[in-house]
Image (spheres, rainbow, N blue to C red):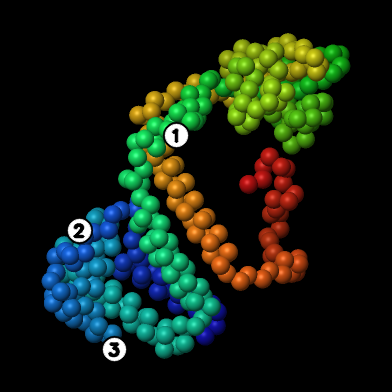
């Protein structure tokens, strides 16, 4: 069978798998107690509902598939007629699976890859999702994270501004006069910033963008980095003095670096969250970090114990068939790269 034909069969099987038993994306949950077996005795679970060729579909298997559905979908099958519909879907799935196997698709590359992915997902669930649970994150861990990262939850008011730094006063006054003629024209500001801005930090693609900073000039993206990376206090004061986003400061702002033309482009209110308010996102973050750390450790152990040989020079021979106009990270401006 051709590759397109193979893909169509795989897609059909995948669609039926979703209809018959694929679980919706839900938060990890504690496994149900094994002894209940969905309310069935061992003998009841072993009874055969249907036979498709040499494959038997048992009552227990159907109960298991039904239990994998979300509560909303399970309610749909709360009658013998609806459960007959579910059984029909299971039979259809088995018929298609047997036919695909008869056509030799078990060894098709797409099928092998899908099977390997399913095995990996099952293994990761058993090793990490079922063992590292959200409810196991303690209140003490949440409180410790909150105290160690107070700056995430107590943030001062911030503004975002753009500037054009010009060392010559006459040139700066001329640029400011041009901007006053069209104060709401954002494109005009960017054009003039690209042409006249002499601040090396905000030249080029940033077109004068200072990004977000607090009233003392600390840049948000540096997390309170070195003082020489902060916005000059005079520029910060001018930006905070503007009330409406898009406003242009009416006068030049003079600093040791030269003369700044300042435009307000954004504003964020102060943020203060208590431990109680921040508890839920902190708990989720700690849970994710624990799981990611465990996975990284597991993968490091696998690499250490495996024999891996790499011929990295061959990477140059791999060609990417990209549509026209797609910009790759290598040619993106640095601040726009993922």
- The earlier-in-sequence mark between 1 and 2 is 2
Q: Residue at x 58, y 18 (%)?
A: 244
Query: Does residue 116 lie above or below 193 as drawn?
Result: below
Q: Residue 155 location, x and y as percent?
A: 51, 23
* Mark 1 and mark 3 residues within 8 Å of each other at the beta carbon: no
Q: Is residue 50 visible?
A: yes
Q: Residue 8: where, in percent of width, then height?
A: 47, 75
- Residue 75: numbered disc: 2
Question: Tag 3 or tag 1, which sits nearer the N-term?
Answer: 3
List x then y, in percent, for residue 114: 47, 72
- Neighbor class of circle 1 (other Cα within 10 Å; few <14, some 14-19, many 20+) is some
User: CA–CA distance between discs 1 and 3?
Assistant: 58 Å
Question: Which residue matches tag 3?
Answer: 53
How many other residues sit within 10 Å of disc 2, few (<14), some (14-19) or many (≥20)?
few
In front: mark 1 or mark 3? 1
Q: Position of residue 1 (x, y in %)?
A: 52, 85
Quarter of the figure with residue 278? top left
Residue wearing tag 1: 145
Please give the name of the residue rendered at 71% of the width and 42% of the height, measured from the top-left corner: 334
User: Which secondary structure, mark 1?
Assistant: helix
Q: CA distance from mark 3 to mark 2?
A: 30 Å
Q: Residue at x 59, y 20 (%)?
A: 214
What residue is drawn where x is 51% and y is 27%?
Answer: 151
């Amino acid at each position: 069978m051709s590759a397109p034909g193979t893909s169509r069969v795989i897609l059909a099987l995948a669609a039926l798998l979703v209809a018959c038993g694929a679980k919706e994306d839900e938060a990890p949950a504690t496994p149900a107690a094994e002894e209940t077996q969905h309310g069935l005795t061992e003998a009841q679970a072993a009874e055969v509902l249907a036979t498709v060729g040499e494959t038997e579909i048992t009552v227990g298997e159907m109960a298991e598939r039904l239990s994998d559905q979300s509560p909303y979908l399970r309610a749909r099958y709360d009658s013998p007629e609806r459960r007959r519909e579910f059984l029909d879907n299971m039979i259809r799935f088995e018929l298609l699976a047997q036919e695909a196997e008869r056509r030799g698709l078990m060894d098709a590359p797409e099928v092998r890859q899908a099977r390997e992915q399913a095995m990996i997902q099952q293994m990761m669930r058993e090793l990490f999702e079922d063992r590292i649970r959200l409810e196991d994150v303690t209140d003490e861990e949440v409180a410790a994270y909150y105290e160690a990262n107070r700056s995430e939850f107590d943030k001062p008011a911030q503004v975002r501004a753009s500037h054009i730094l010009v060392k010559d006063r006459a040139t700066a006054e001329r640029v400011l006069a041009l901007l006053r003629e069209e104060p709401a024209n954002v494109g005009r500001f960017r054009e003039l910033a690209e042409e006249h801005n002499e601040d090396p930090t905000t030249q080029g693609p940033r077109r004068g963008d200072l990004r977000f900073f607090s009233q003392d000039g600390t840049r948000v993206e540096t997390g309170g980095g070195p003082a020489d990376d902060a916005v000059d206090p005079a520029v910060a004061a001018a930006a905070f003095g503007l009330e409406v986003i898009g406003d242009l400061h009416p006068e030049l702002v003079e600093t040791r670096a030269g003369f700044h033309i300042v435009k307000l482009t954004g504003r964020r209110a102060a943020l203060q969250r208590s431990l109680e308010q921040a508890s839920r996102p902190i708990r989720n973050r700690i849970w994710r970090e624990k799981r990611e750390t465990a996975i990284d450790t597991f993968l490091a152990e696998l690499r250490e114990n495996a024999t891996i040989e790499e011929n990295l020079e061959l990477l140059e021979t791999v060609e990417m068939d990209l549509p026209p106009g797609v910009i790759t990270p290598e040619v993106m401006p640095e601040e726009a790269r993922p």
